[in-house]
Amino acid sequence: MTPRDLWQRYKTLLLDEPSLGVRLDLSRMGFGEELFRERQALVERAFAAMAALERGEIANPDEKRMVGHYWLRAPEKAPTPEIAAAIRATLERVRDFARRVHDGRVKPPGAERFRHLLVIGIGGSALGPQLVADALSSSADRLQPHFLDNTDPDGIDRVLSRLGGALGETLAIVISKSGGTPETRNGMLEAAAAYKSHDLELGPHALAITQEGSALDRLALEQRFLERFPMWDWVGGRTSVTSAVGLVPAALQGIDVARFLAGAAAMDDVTRRPDARRNPATLLALAWHAAGEGRGSKAMVVLPYKDRLLLFSRYLQQLVMESLGKEKDLEGRVVHQGLAVYGNKGSTDQHAYVQQLRDGSADFFVTFVRVLRDREGPSLEVEKGATSGDFLDGLLLGTRRALHESGRPSLTLTLPDVSARSLGMLIALYERAVGLYASFIGINAYHQPGVEAGKKAAASVLDLQRKVLAALVERGARGGTCEELAEAAGAPDEAETVFHVLERLAANPERDIGRRPGPTPFAAIYSFDRH
């Protein structure tokens, strides 16, 4: 295809949305007009399913609940006046609480004001807030955000050590719908211990975002947390960033949450269009479907050429992969669907894995995210007539060309800038695209049985560990091998898991588990050695 042909193809397939400042270019994806004809029935089915979702039909049959994250930025579309009123009231409470923190009316007991945030959550309760915090941070931030998003003890220590003596000026935000999520509960307990080590209490330095009546909600009442904000059962974690989950930390940081919601609402309006050619979310979903042959046979590599969007691919990994990675379709047939997502940022990727993208396995398609606004203020010329931003854009366009010359498909999404409004648009665009694509492939995007299975398996390991520790205490100094202890714990078939558990416990002296080496790792003797 000649450059002139490519230019004509670009003009034909480009979606330009001036009201949003967004462009979507599918010209390098390897399909043409036939895509729209061949998949028209899929598109119509997806539009119908999306309309039903927004009307409030049950979308998560496992939990018998609606899925209403779109109502968060358009309360008037909620299926009941009560839901609409709750959304509006919560938004006003978020804004009011942030104002009172910023002006010092809400403050810690022993300091003039709060200056830091410690957000404690995992999955959707962390990834969305982290993306927003990093993408929209500035020197004008009212509170500096920090995150406990795992149950890794060393990771927790690293975050808390950065706060150091500022813990008394730190507002902890504990985010968990049920209040029983182990990682979040553990992070909260670790944070509470850190506050206590500074002669402080968690309650006067904390707020909760949780479901009414949950274990966390009850704890927040008992310990007199500063505030409690709702998590509704019709908002899933991976689509919760425009709820209190994302809005509370953003507003406290000083981000304009009204513009963030307005951007999401504006994109929602555009992605409700029934014309696939003028609907950017439908075009994205169609591109994914065509590239992966309707079964996710190619991974999506996300390359945002903007440092502020570094965390975008991590955010998309949950949104896309947790939504689309399903064993069974809506008819109960085993299909093993999914769409793998990975990425970093440009032009860092020029010096990392772009080599493989151009010359290695053709098992992917690329999404370039291009941002037109370089920075606030003028740029230095690093060469005559060229700025750092010119180099960045040149590297994007050059990589796009090099991949096309190697027959590697790509699409390019162009944003005007990285602002509260444009980030809201970006998030809403991909939320809608995921929902439409799920309809194309006939799976439920709004449940996650695999995640729940993993949680149950983890709980069983911890239960086994408790039984092994009891067996160790009973055996005393003579101890036993992993096989003997598995037998004593009533789980002879779990010797491998017992081996892994004992090896880690023995590596941590404070756990009081001794290890005497044997001729092989599996013949080591473990014993309970109270120091």
Image: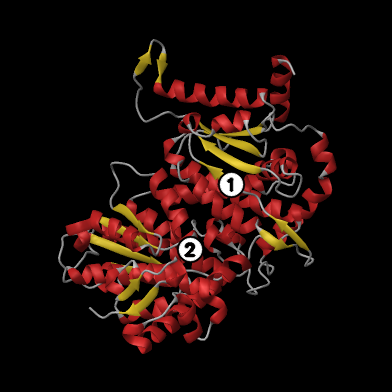
- Looking at the image, is mark 2 or mark 1 earlier in the sequence? 2
Of the pair 163 and 248, the residue shown nearer to us: 163
| Residue at figure coordinates x 44%, y 44% from the top left | 420
Judging by the rendered image, the residue that carries numbered circle 1 is 341
Q: The C terminus lies in which quarter of the figure?
A: bottom left
- The front one of 489 and 28 is 489
**Is residue 56 rendered to the left or right of residue 189?**
right
**Seen in the image, is 97 located left or right of residue 330?**
left
The answer to whether residue 268 is left or right of residue 347 is right
Label annotation for residue 88: 2
* Residues packed near mark 1 inside 10 Å, few (<14), some (14 to 19) or many (20 plus): many
Residue ranking furthest to the top: 384
Question: Residue 286: horizontal and vertical position, in percent?
Answer: 72, 43
The three-letter amino acid code for the residue at tag 2 is: Arg
Q: What residue is at 44 percent from the left and 74 percent from the top?
A: 179
Residue type, numbered disc 1: Val
Q: Is residue 358 visible?
A: yes
Q: What is the number of the mark on residue 222?
A: none
Residue lying at 46% horizontally and 41% vertically, measured from the top left: 309
Say which quarter of the image contains residue 279: top right
Q: Position of residue 136 (x, y in %)?
A: 39, 44
Residue placed most toward the observer, 447 or 49: 447
Q: Is residue 96 left or right of residue 314?
A: left
Give the CA separation, mark 2 to mark 1: 34 Å
The N terminus - image quarter: top right
